[in-house]
Every structure is written in C-alpha cells, then in structure tokens.
Image (cartoon, rainbow, N blue to C red):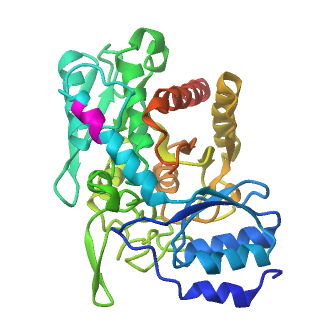
Amino acid sequence: MKYSLGLLVLFVGATLVAADQDYEGYRIYEVIPSSADQAHLLHQLSLQGYDFISETRLLGHPSRVIVSPGQLEQFERLVEAENMTHNLVNSNLGASIAEEFAQRQMQRLLAPITGKGRLSTERYYTHEEIINYIDDLAQRFPSRVFVKTVGWSYEKRVLKTITITNGDGKANKKVIFMDGGFHAREWISPAAVLYVIDQLVEQFEENAHLLKDYDWVILPLVNADGYEHSQTGTLARMWRKTRQPYTYGGQTCYGADPNRNFDFHWNEEGASSNPCADTYAGPTAFSEPETITVRDLMHSLADRGIMYLTIHSYGNYLLYPWGWTSDLPENWEDLDAVARTGAEAIQNATGTEYTYGSSTNVLYIAAGASDDYGYYAGFNVSITMELTGAGSIGFNPPVTRIDEFVTETWIGIRAMAEKVIEMY
C-alpha cells in the first residue's frame, strides 16, 4: 500500500466516539481521496472508530468525518502525509448542535402540534407527533388509509405502519414497502417519508396512478428509541443506533446499528462486534425488536412485495444490492434502471446529482443491511436512498430548507415508483 502503515497504526488504538457527550471543539472535515489507496485508508479509519457521516469509495467524491479534539493532531498528520485533499467544513460541531436545538425549542413554543390535519415542512417532528399524524389520517380517510400496530421498540414505543390505497376495495394488490428513520440522527429521513405520505393521501388526485394497482405500506420511523434519544439534547444529537443496553469490558454501551442487524450475511465485513461501535451488528442477528418488526413486515408482504425503499441520509446515492459483496444480483439491470430513473428525474428537476449503483461498488461492503434482506426476502427491487446533505451537521437540513429537500426527494421516489409500475 502507498499509505504509511505506521501512521495508520496511530489510529488503531484510538478510542471510539463516546455515545452521549459534549461535542464542543469537535470538527467535521471533508476529505476527497484521489487514489484507491487513499479511499481504502479512509475506510480503515471508519472501521477503527472514526465517525464518518458520509463515506464513498469513488475517487474525487468527498467523504465527511467527525474529528474529536483528541484525534485532531493524528488526523491532520495522516491526511497531510498522504497529500489527501481535505477541507474544514465545521470548526465546532458542539456549537452547531446547540444552535440547532435552540432554534428547535423556539419553533415548538411558537407552533405547538395538535396531531390533527396536515403537517408542515417547517420543522422536525417527534415520534409521538408522527404517530398522531398517521392515526389522524386513518380517521379522516377511512376508505383509503389503514394504520396498524406492527411492533414495539425496546423502550416500548409503538411502531405503526400506514397502508395507503385508492379505496377501490381490491385485495392482494402489489405492494411498495417503504421505511424511514433507521439511523437516529438522520432526522430528514422521517421528514421525507412524511412528505411521501402527504402526497399519496392529501394529494391523491395528482398521484392516483401510483395507487391503481399498488398499495403502499409505510413504516415512517423504524428506530423510534434512538430518534427520540437524539432529540433529548445536545449531548445525544449524533446518536445513530438503537437503545438496548449491552455490557462490554465492564461498561454499558447502548444499542446496535439496525442496518447491520439483519440475518443475511450478518456480522461480516463492514460491521463491528464491539457494542460501543456505531456499526455494532448486535450480539445476534435480529437482536433488536425494531429489526424484527421490519423483517416480519417484509415476509408478510413478500408474496405481493415488488419494491422495498428505505430512506437514509446523507450522500446523494441510490443504492441497490448487494451490500455484502461486490457481486451483482441476477436482475441488477432492472435495479439499475429504477435507480437511474430516480437520479435522472431529480437532476432534470433540480440539478442535484445522485450517484446510483450497487452498495458495495459505490460505497463499501456493509453486511446485514435491510436492503439486502429485502431483496433476499423476495422484493424484486430493493433500494436505499441516501438523501442530499445540508447544514452544519448534514443529517438535517436547516428547517428553512426542509421543504426543498423533501419535495426533491419525492420527485425521485415518484419517478422510481412509476418505473417499477411500468416494469412489474
């Protein structure tokens, strides 16, 4: 390898980013690899505990990494020694998080939510508000909307799906299954899913063709515990995992990465066996009640399920299986056509560029993910959509730009759904 193994060793003993902490003085760097060796080096850092909030193996494409004050000297030595292009994009993550929370608290005071009527795109909502919203839709549109309790989180928060139909009463239609909120800190994900729900229900006339032969089953928030935890205050803002406690080396570490917890090539490359790591795969496959819920939904829908779509943030990617290997599924050309259609629709409408391809070949191997499992369970098309990032943190665009981002996302989702309907 071109890069210095000696410098890399400096990172092997680096401590993992603590779960709940003050991010004062933490920085976010954008790093752009220009060679395969540099890209590989960045990936090795991610496996050794560095929190990459976006990562790619594509040369010339930026990755973003959080660097703690204690890691700063070593990190700068490494990127400078390797002549790796890097830019400081946030000089104090803690200050950005504090500002975000102050704005959020002011919004809640000025615009309290009743759980009735349409949700605006001017703020991020709590788990309770999301559940109240879909319950209200079921009451207002009883012939087209059905809400069902499908599971409970570790901390006993209810997990509900909303099934959206055209109300014609026909049974056994094909299904598009969609979910959001796998990773707690990705607040824009449930926001985008809520907008999809709004378009299919409140804007039914404009989108009736998407519901003629298909039902949409949507789980708006998978990781309810982690999502709520990330909203409790500045110390928890960057939380990613679930919240089930695990003991490791005499300490308690919380949660597993739900997107590494599926029983398909579970705990292989790209996942961690360390409970304190952000990519912890869990002590066993399906150790988390949240992933059990998604699994059971997939199998219950598989005989009708055509497309599985999971919404994440961020990076501007439309990814399809496999994530556990660089090999491609048999119908990869169909998957590629659907992803390409979404990317082209977004670019034509807004100019935003999305990269599409198989997860491993665009990013890195990440075994045990939900999109791989959805395809394995029988869905013809399985797509992970990594939304556009913005703001000082990336996972959540400023509230003034939520509408812009969710409408852009809907353009891609609608185009992909139309392509799936055309193909299947």
Q: Residue lying farthest top?
A: 205
Establish if 419 lies above or below 328.
Answer: above
Taking 317 as reference, is 173 above or below it? above
Image coordinates for residue 186, horizontal then vertical, percent: 43, 49
Please, what is the dominant secondary structure of the magenta stretch? helix
Q: Which of these two is toward me, 43 or 234?
A: 234
Q: Residue 238's x, y, as percent?
A: 41, 59
Q: Residue at x 46, y 15 (%)?
A: 207
Vertical position of residue 318 compared to residue 407: above or below: below
140 to the left or right of 44: left
Measured from the top left, where is residue 247 in percent x and y?
27, 82
Occupied quadrant, residue 289? bottom left
The answer to whether 115 appears left or right of 387 in the picture is left
> Which contiguous range is marked in magenta?
105-109
- Res 341 quadrant in image: top right
Q: Tell me if I can see residue 381 in this picture.
A: yes
Q: How many marks?
A: 0
Q: Is residue 212 left or right of residue 362?
A: left
Q: Is residue 302 visible?
A: no
Q: Residue at x 62, y 43 (%)?
A: 316
Q: Is residue 106 magenta?
A: yes
Pick the residue in front: 298 or 233: 233
Question: 97 and 360: which one is in front?
Answer: 97
Is 160 contained in the magenta span? no
x and y, in percent, of residue 399 in the image: 43, 34
Residue drawn at (76%, 71%) of the image:
38
Which quadrant holds the N terminus? bottom right
Residue at image point 30% right, 33% down = 107
